[in-house]
Image (cartoon, grey):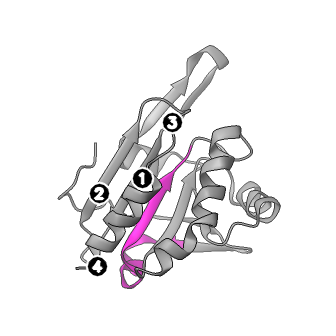
Amino acid sequence: MVSVGDDAPDFTAPLADGSVDSFTLSEHLDEAPLVVAFFPAAFTGTCTTEMCTFRDRMTNFEDVGATVYGISIDTPFTLNEFRDQNDLNFGLISDTNRELVDAYDVSMDFADLGVRNVAKRAVFVVDGDGTVTYEWVSDDPGVEPDYGAVAEAAEDARK
């Protein structure tokens, strides 16, 4: 698993930001600190709550110059609809090929539902050098991150 002090795995994936664009992590390090929040699936209870909480607390991240991105295995078209329906004010990255889930080693299964290789709920903060300065990964998909700790880690990553 990606840990604090590691280089963040670079990637290129579709970005749902109202349209669909290509997003390459290394090309966005000037927006650092980057808060990269993996979530299992759009339109599900805890995932919607989590993404809406990031939306509602966006000023905490903007105040420290951080940029937030959500990542799930949903298509970019689904993620744009999810953004629209929840008035999300940040981009969502589509990992339909599960490359990011694998690169960050945050894959999990809902075996009883027959759903495999979705993202665990996880948050990474990446500084301007591309180094992971904070990581939180939950094996319980019903647990949300400590948003205050994430904002504090983003502020620390600026230094």
Kind of residue indicated by mark 2: Tyr
From the image, which quarter does the C terminus lie in? Answer: bottom left
Residue topped by disc 4? 158
Which mark is nearer the camera, 1 or 3? 3
Residue topped by disc 3? 143
Please tell me whether residue 40 is drawn above or below residue 148 in the rendered image: above
Residue stretch rendered in magenta on the structure: 23-39
Residue topped by disc 2? 134
Q: Residue at x 62, y 14 (%)?
A: 112
Labels 3 and 2: the sequence-earlier one: 2
Where's residue 99, x and y in %? 46, 49
Give how far apart the Cα atoms at labels 3 and 4 are.
27 Å
Q: Categorize mark 2 by other alpha carbons within 10 Å: few (<14), some (14-19), many (20+).
A: many
Judge left or right: residue 76 versus residue 35: right
Dots 2 and 4: beta carbons under 8 Å? no
Outermost residue to the top: 112
Give how far apart the Cα atoms at labels 3 and 2 are.
17 Å
Residue 92 is at least partly visible in this image:
no
Q: Residue at x 53, y 33 (%)?
A: 141
Q: Categorize mark 4 by other alpha carbons within 10 Å: few (<14), some (14-19), many (20+).
A: some
Which mark is nearer the camera, 3 or 2? 3
Outermost residue to the bottom: 30
Residue topped by disc 1? 123
Please tell me whether residue 46 is drawn above or below residue 57 in the rendered image: above
Where's residue 108, x and y in %? 48, 30
Judge left or right: residue 100 versus residue 50: left
Give how far apart the Cα atoms at labels 2 and 4 are.
12 Å
Q: Residue at x 42, y 58 (%)?
A: 148
